[in-house]
Amino acid sequence: MLNRMLGAAMLKGSTIEDVEHDRSATLQAMAVVIMVSIASGIGGLLAGEADIVRGVVFGVIRGLLSWAIWAGAALIVGTTILKTPETSADWGEVARGTGFAQTPGLLNILVFIPILGEIVRVVTFFWQLAAMLMAIRESLDYNSLWRAFFVVLIALIPVLIVNGILVWALGI
């Protein structure tokens, strides 16, 4: 699992292909999402941005929900609106790739460090975005990062809506 996490973080398409086709890797991808959510929650907790419930418990719930919705939305957009003749995927394939793509988010545990924390937050965001683009490109069998970019962008809309509702309703 660690090798897969490193491969995804290093933007290796072969790693994404490997997890995409390994049905037993879905729980591993879920574990990555949980670890990233916990790391982010602890970082926020140490930075004084959240308490243990909001930062970690709701963070894990929100992370898993966001991951599932994003994978589903990316699958729908990628296999209908932006489909290519080569495109073939199911939710599990997309979810495994996008789950492992979150690996750089482990660095969010460092956001509590003055000055460095904000740099880590920005770098991690763009690193995860790059990994997500690779995951979508590989799992939907695209040849173009631009097509993957538009899938990621469009699929982000329902994730933002659900997160907005959670933040509003639960104050997380």
Image (spheres, rainbow, N blue to C red):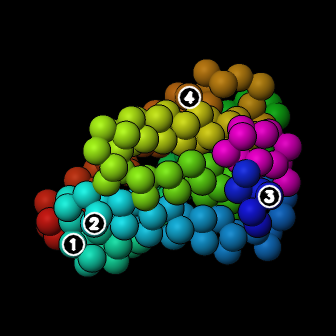
Give the Cα distance between marks 4 and 3.
Answer: 25 Å
Kindly indicate whether the residue at mark 2 contacts the one at mark 1 (C-beta within 8 angstroms): yes
- Going from N to C along the chain, the mark reached first, 2 or 3, is 3
Q: Relative to residue 133, is residue 23 depicted above or below?
A: below
Amino acid tagged 2: Leu
Q: Residue at x 44, y 69 (%)?
A: 38
What amino acid type is highlighted by mark number 1?
Asp
* Magenta-drawn segment: 7-19
Which residue is at 28% across, 50% downward? 161
Tell me the residue at 25%/58% (across/down).
47
Could you tell whether 90 is left or right of 36 in the image?
right
**Callout 2: 10 Å neighbours few (<14), some, many (20+)?**
many
Q: Quadrant of the N terminus?
A: bottom right
Which residue is label 4 attached to? Answer: 149
Whole-number angstrom distance, CA of label 1 to CA of label 2: 6 Å
Q: CA distance from mark 2 to mark 3?
A: 28 Å
Q: For this rendering, which residue is in front, 108 or 136?
A: 108
Eyeballing the image, is 151 above or below 111? above
Dominant SS of magenta comes to: helix
Q: Eyeballing the image, is 139 above or below 45?
A: above
Q: Which secondary structure lies at badge 4?
A: helix
Residue 90, quarter of picture:
bottom right
Residue identifier under label 3: 3
Q: Which mark is residue 51?
A: 1
Secondary structure beneath disc 1? loop
The residue that mark 2 highlights is 45
